[in-house]
Image (cartoon, helix red, strand yellow):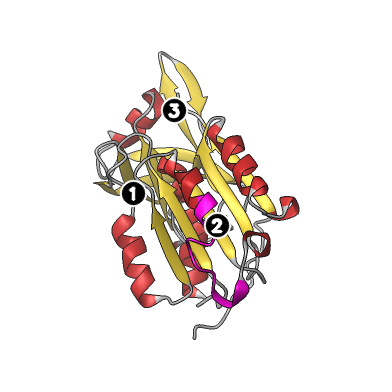
Amino acid sequence: MMQSLELVRPSKAMDCIATVVASDWLTPTIKSIRLDLHNPDFAFLPGQSVWPKFERDGKRFSKIYSIASSPSQCPIVELCVSRVGWSSAYLQDLPIGASLPLRGPYGLMTIDRLPTLPRLYIVEGSGIAPIKSQIEWLYEQQYEHPVWLVQANPETPDELPYEDLWRSLTLQWPQFRYFETIRPESILQTIASFRNGIVSFRNGIDLDDFEIDICAVDDRSSQIRDAVLAHGANAAAVRSESFHAF
C-alpha cells in the first residue's frame, strides 16, 4: 500500500503561463488537454480549477475549468474540455507548444485529506474532470473504502470520457466500482437500483453511508441531488456543482 498523503490547501492563487504539451480526443466532442505550468510551486487540491484567460474581439475573458489530473502530476495539469462554446473551442484548437495564461487554483468541492467514508461520484460529460482528479488521487493512496462512479455523457451517450481508465481501475482496485449509463436519465435509474437492492452493497452499505459528489449540466445537478436524497442519502454528505457553456 502506498503511504497516505495529507494534502495542504494552497495558500493563494497564482498566475502562470502554461504550455500545451498534449491534446487528445476522448470522445467526438471532449478533449484532454495537458498543460505544463512551468512552476514547481503550483499546488492544488483534488477537485480544484484554473481560470484560463482568453481574448476575443479585443476583449479579455476568463472561464473556469476543473483540473482533471491528480496533484501528484504537478506542474503538469490536465483539462477535460467539451466543445460547447467559443471558449472551449479556443482551448481545443490550441496547437502543441501554444502558450496560455491562467490563474489558480480555485474551488471548494475538494478533498484535502483521506476521507473516512465511502465515496459515490455522479457525473455528466466533462463534469468528470474534478471527479477524475479525486479518484486518481484516492487510487494513488490505495484508499480502503468503496469508491463508486456513475457516469453519463449527454453529448455522445455511447462514448464516455475516460471509460477505458475506469474499466482498468475496476481490475486493479477492489474498492472501485464503475456504472456506465448510456442516457443521462439512466443516472436516476441507477440511483434507484441502489435503493431497491438491484446493485448489491458489500457489508451492508447503503446510500446514507456515502459521501456523494455530483457534477452535472445546468439544473440536472439539482435533479440528481433530489434523487439521491429521495433514495436515502444523507443531505449533509451530498455536494453538487453544475457547469455551463459559452
Residue 64 in the image: state x and y as whole percent.
Answer: 52, 36
Mark number, residue 54: 3
Which of 242 and 112 lies nearest the eye of the viewer?
242
Q: Tag 2: Cα neighbours inside 10 Å, few (<14), some, or many (≥20)? A: few
Badge 2 vs badge 1, beta-carbon distance below 8 Å: no
Residue drawn 28% across the image and 47% down it: 26
Determine the secondary structure under disc 2. Answer: helix
The amino acid type of the residue labelled 2 equals Asn
Count up the numbered dots.
3
Residue 42 in view, yes or no: no
Image depth: mark 2 or mark 1 in front: 2
Q: Left or right: where does residue 99 sit relative to residue 227?
A: left
Tell me which numbered mark, 2 or 3, is placed earlier along the sequence: 3
Q: Which residue is mark 2?
A: 196
Q: Position of residue 128 (x, y in %)?
A: 45, 48
Query: Could you tell me the amino acid type at mark 1?
Result: Pro
- Is residue 208 visible in the rendered image? The answer is yes
